[in-house]
Structure formats: structure tokens, C-alpha cells
Image (cartoon, helix red, strand yellow):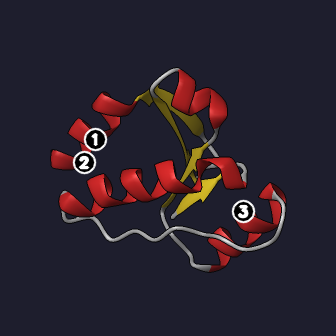
Amino acid sequence: AVVPVSDAQINDCYSLLQEIRSNKVKAEIVLGKSNFSKRMQKAQKLNPQYVVIYGADELLNNEVRHKNLATSVEVSESKDNFIASLRE
């Protein structure tokens, strides 16, 4: 699941979602007229292995932050490395 931190990142999240899906990984974007914590709750209900958190800081630094929901470990890495890891 891809979760935008705010509405300002929605278009960028759709671009990221397309890149993820182009690597044959199932993913969807979590939207709604809710705040970030409600979006995260919605994402958790989808029961994904990972949640990708994409906000202004990540966009500015060309990074992706992803959280493993099973271990609660959260990692930030370059967007290029993240996309490359999907291909492995």
C-alpha cells in the first residue's frame, strides 16, 4: 500500500504506484479525506506486508520510506534503490 502523507503528494504517489506495479508487485494507494494516521489505519486493514509512506520530505530527497507491518521496522532509502529492490 502507498500512503501519501498529505494531499499534496497524491499525484507523486500515483507515479510511484505505477513504478511499483510495473515491477509486477501488487499495490494500491490509500486515499480519503482523512489525516495521515487514518490513512495508515486504512492501509493496515488491507493487510499488506509493507506500507510505503510518501511525503514532502521523501519527494524532496528522492527517497521512499517503507514500513514492514509484521516487524514495525521502518526504513528510508533512495527511490532508485527501492525500485531496484522490487526487481530482485
The residue sitting at the bottom extreme is: 45
Local SS, label 1: helix
Give the labeled residue for mark 3. Answer: 40
Local SS, label 3: helix
Q: Is residue 46 left or right of residue 26?
A: right
Query: Measuring 46% from the left and 71% from the top, which residue is drawn there?
Result: 28
* Vertical placement of residue 51 versus 9, above or below: below
- Circle number at residue 86: 2
The crowding category of the residue bearing disc 1, from other C-alpha atoms within 10 Å (few below 14, some 14 to 19, many at least 20), is some
Query: Measuring 19% from the left and 57% from the top, which residue is drawn there?
Result: 23
Give the percent coordinates (x, y) of residue 82.
Answer: 34, 37
Disc 2 from disc 3: Cα separation: 22 Å
**Front position among marks 2 and 1:** 1
Amino acid type at mark 1: Ile
Amino acid type at mark 3: Met
Give the percent coordinates (x, y) of residue 88.
Answer: 15, 45
Disc 2 from disc 1: Cα separation: 5 Å
Cβ–Cβ under 8 Å for marks 3 and 1: no
Amino acid type at mark 2: Leu
Disc 3 from disc 1: Cα separation: 22 Å
- Circle number at residue 83: 1
- Circle number at residue 9: none
The crowding category of the residue bearing disc 3, from other C-alpha atoms within 10 Å (few below 14, some 14 to 19, many at least 20), is many
* Vertical placement of residue 10 versus 39, above or below: above
Query: Measuring 60% from the left and 41% from the top, which residue is drawn there?
Result: 73
Out of 22 and 9, give the one closest to the viewer.
9
Local SS, label 2: helix
Out of 49 and 11, give the one closest to the viewer.
11
* Vertical placement of residue 21 versus 47, above or below: above
Cβ–Cβ under 8 Å for marks 2 and 1: yes
Out of 66 and 6, give the one closest to the viewer.
6
Q: Is residue 17 left or right of residue 71?
A: left
